[in-house]
């Protein structure tokens, strides 16, 4: 008696897309995630294209009284501040400041330090794991903003001489006054940027290192570097991206808070913290509410979008809803 094998239909196992395509498909299906991605893309595109999408120099001051604290109009889309500077241009360039800061901190803190230390702690274990995790626990026990304020205040005065030297002896010129304060707040954020990423990566590595394919690679004599890059890292990457998306709002908030308190970027460099500081006060909000709204709404949307995207990625990566 012969057995008839039915052909595979669309949707059968043989025609299912690869796991990475299923990940993208699940992400596209989540409308909240797509809205968050669109808002984040608009924010970062505004920062990247700031010199082209701005309507004027963000630091250009208009001297006439009529052009100061002007309400939104066709000439000044978001109005002007107390110095007569165009708020739309300053918001766009503030987005660029946030873009550069978050990118530098993510690349150096979360990617280089957090990922590397997490892989090393989880795979090696022993005293290496203990040392890395204890340092992270000590730093996480210190109020983040308080220590960032202390670091920024302690080094700011001493590094002013470095800024003047760079101005006179390097190609930076006048930009040195903006670069040095920026590097100070980046250095103040780095001690905390790697902790969350290292913990997430370590927890995943502890589970992955016991998998059969990792044990098989160890048996044939694969080097530690090859094991971590070729076998362990691909399994860590999804949850690592979730951790980065969840920490983006906090990283950007550190720069905004320092700039708001006057210890962040140079005052001539547009920043959302500086915009909020200039718009502070009950009288200013009552008489010129546009100053607070045009600086506060982009920040709220930025934080909200990253949190929504992080929640969506957790739902997708969670094994109960997404099987790799």
Image: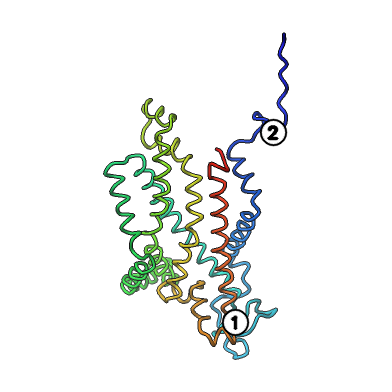
- Asked whether, in this view, residue 1 is left or right of residue 41, the answer is right
- Asked whether, in this view, residue 77 is left or right of residue 253, the answer is right
Q: Check residue 207 in the rendering and tell me which mark sits there, or answer none.
A: none
- Whole-number angstrom distance, CA of label 2 to CA of label 1: 55 Å
Q: Is residue 114 visible?
A: yes
Mark in the foreground, 2 or 1: 2
Q: Please tell me in which quadrant of the rendered image residue 2 appears.
A: top right
Question: Which secondary structure lies at badge 1?
Answer: helix
Give the total of numbered labels.
2
**41 vs 65: above or below:** above
Neighbours of disc 2 within 10 Å: few (<14), some (14-19), many (20+): few
Rendering colour mode:
rainbow
Q: Is residue 165 visible?
A: no
Which residue appears farthest toward the left when viewing the image? 127
**147 vs 211: above or below:** below
Name the residue carrying label 1: 289
**Quadrant where the C terminus is found in the figure:** top right
How far across and down, in percent of the image, does residue 217 sit?
A: 41, 29
């Amino acid at each position: 008696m012969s057995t008839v094998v039915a052909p595979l239909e669309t949707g059968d196992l043989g025609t299912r897309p690869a796991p990475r395509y299923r990940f993208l498909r699940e992400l596209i299906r989540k409308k909240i995630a797509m809205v968050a991605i669109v808002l984040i893309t608009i924010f970062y595109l505004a920062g990247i294209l700031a010199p082209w999408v701005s309507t004027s120099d963000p630091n250009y001051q208009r001297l006439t009284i009529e052009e100061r604290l002007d309400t939104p109009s066709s000439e000044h889309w978001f109005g002007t501040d107390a110095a007569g500077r165009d708020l739309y241009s300053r918001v766009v360039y503030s987005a660029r400041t946030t873009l550069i800061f978050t990118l530098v901190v993510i690349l150096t803190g979360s990617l280089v330090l957090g990922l590397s230390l997490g892989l090393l702690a989880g795979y090696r274990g022993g005293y290496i794991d203990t040392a890395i995790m204890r340092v992270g626990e000590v730093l996480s026990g210190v109020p983040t903003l308080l220590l960032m304020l202390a670091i920024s205040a302690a080094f700011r005065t001493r590094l002013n001489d470095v800024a003047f030297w760079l101005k006179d002896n390097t190609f930076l010129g006048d930009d040195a006054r903006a670069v040095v304060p920026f590097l100070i707040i980046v250095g103040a954020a780095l001690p905390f940027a790697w902790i969350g990423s290292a913990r997430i990566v370590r927890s995943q590595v502890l589970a992955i290192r016991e998998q059969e394919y990792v044990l098989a690679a160890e048996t044939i004599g694969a080097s530690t570097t090859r094991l971590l890059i070729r076998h362990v890292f691909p399994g860590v990457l999804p949850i690592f991206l979730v951790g980065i998306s969840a920490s983006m709002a906090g990283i950007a908030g550190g720069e905004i808070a320092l700039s708001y308190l006057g210890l962040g970027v140079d005052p001539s460099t547009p920043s959302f913290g500086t915009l909020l500081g200039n718009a502070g006060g009950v009288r200013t909000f009552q008489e010129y509410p546009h100053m607070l709204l045009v600086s506060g709404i982009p920040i709220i949307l930025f934080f909200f979008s990253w949190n929504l995207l992080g929640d969506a990625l957790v739902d997708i990566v969670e094994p109960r809803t997404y099987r790799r």
